[in-house]
């Protein structure tokens, strides 16, 4: 082996090895981190009125929860962003759902919005679910999230929330911009792409690992 070859071999090892180590630990963090629980025991939805009469629940579901109140006319952009960036990517996962909280009496507007979404992107909207309640019911559900955010006078806000199968609000407790990230701004494609997509991947991986561990133990 020539001295020149040895020299380049050593330089290659010195250059490549740190990169390999970095990628290993970065991958480990993504694969094994848990998405922090920010609020436990969010209120259940099983008694709420729904669009098609079928019950909707948070328990045993991974839910993207949003509050649209009586502000549906301004939520088309939010709906398109969420449908394109989140729903289309994850809706085929078992037990994954979108739940939007709307003021009672807006059922016709919801059907119109769903038809627009379906026509625009051609996605099966079977896991887009809507629940309808009074002002007091919407406020009580929102308060159970225990966040520093506030509903508008129309009982809506641009943020959506990740609720796990045990009805815990999940998010980030070390976000570089806001510290604790309770919800994700559906008006911001960048925030959905750079944060929400990653966080849903983390929570789905968490449940897949738990299921795999259970199956291995059961066998």
Image (cartoon, rainbow, N blue to C red):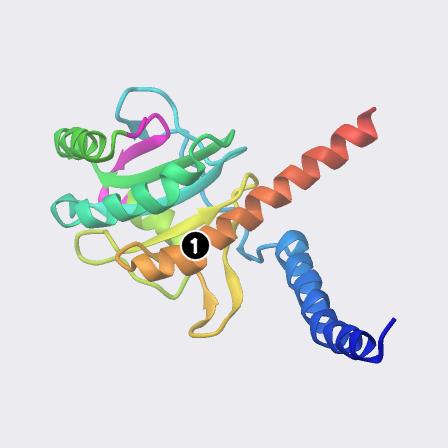
70 and 194: which is toward the camera: 194
Residue 213 occupies which quadrant of the picture?
Answer: top right
**Residue at 56 percent of width and 42 percent of height:** 204
Q: Residue 53, position in %: x, y?
A: 30, 19
Q: Is residue 33 left or right of residue 84?
A: right
With 16 as the anchor, is 42 left or right in this view? left
Residue 188 falls in image quadrant = bottom left
What's drawn in magenta, residue-wise?
Answer: 123-136
| The one of 13 and 73 positioned closer to us in this rendering | 13
- Figure quadrant of the N terminus: bottom right
Q: Position of residue 66 (x, y in %)?
A: 33, 46
Number of disc labels: 1
State the image coordinates of residue 166 (x, y, percent, origin top left). 57, 41
Residue beneath the point at 68% across and 40% down: 209
Query: For numbered disc 1, what is the local secondary structure?
Result: helix
Q: Furthest residue to the right?
A: 1
Residue 56 within the segment the image draws in magenta = no
Task: Provide the residue designation for mark 1.
Answer: 196
Nearer the observer, 37 or 197: 197
* Residue at 58% in and 58% down: 36
Task: Tell me the quarter of the image containing the C terminus.
Answer: top right
Q: Is residue 146 visible?
A: no
Q: Label 1 crowding class (10 Å Cα cut-off): few <14, some 14-19, many 20+?
A: many
Most extreme residue toward the front is 2
Q: Is residue 181 found left or right of 132 in the rendered image?
A: right
* In the image, residue 125 lies in the stretch drawn in magenta: yes
Q: Is 110 situated above or below 200?
A: above
Residue at left 68%, top 34%? 211
């Amino acid at each position: 082996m020539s001295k020149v070859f040895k020299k380049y071999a050593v330089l290659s090892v010195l250059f490549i090895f740190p990169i390999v180590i970095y990628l290993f630990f970065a991958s480990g963090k993504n694969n094994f981190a848990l998405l922090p629980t920010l609020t436990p025991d969010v209120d259940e939805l099983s008694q709420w009125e729904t669009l098609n009469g079928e019950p909707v629940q948070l328990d045993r579901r991974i839910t993207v929860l949003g509050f649209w109140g009586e502000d549906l006319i301004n939520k088309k952009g939010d709906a398109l962003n969420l449908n394109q960036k989140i729903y289309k990517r994850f809706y085929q996962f078992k037990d994954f759902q979108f739940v939007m909280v709307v003021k009672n009496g807006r059922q016709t507007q919801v059907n119109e919005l769903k038809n627009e979404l379906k026509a625009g992107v051609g996605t099966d909207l079977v896991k887009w679910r809507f629940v309808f309640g009074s002002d007091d019911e919407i406020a009580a559900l929102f308060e159970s999230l225990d966040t520093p955010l506030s509903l508008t006078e129309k009982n809506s806000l641009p943020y959506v929330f990740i609720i796990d199968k045990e009805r815990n609000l999940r998010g980030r407790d070390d976000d570089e911009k806001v510290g604790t990230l309770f919800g994700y701004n559906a008006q911001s494609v960048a925030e959905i792409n750079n944060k929400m997509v990653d966080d849903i991947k983390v929570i789905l991986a968490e449940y897949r690992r738990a299921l795999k561990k259970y199956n291995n133990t059961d066998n």
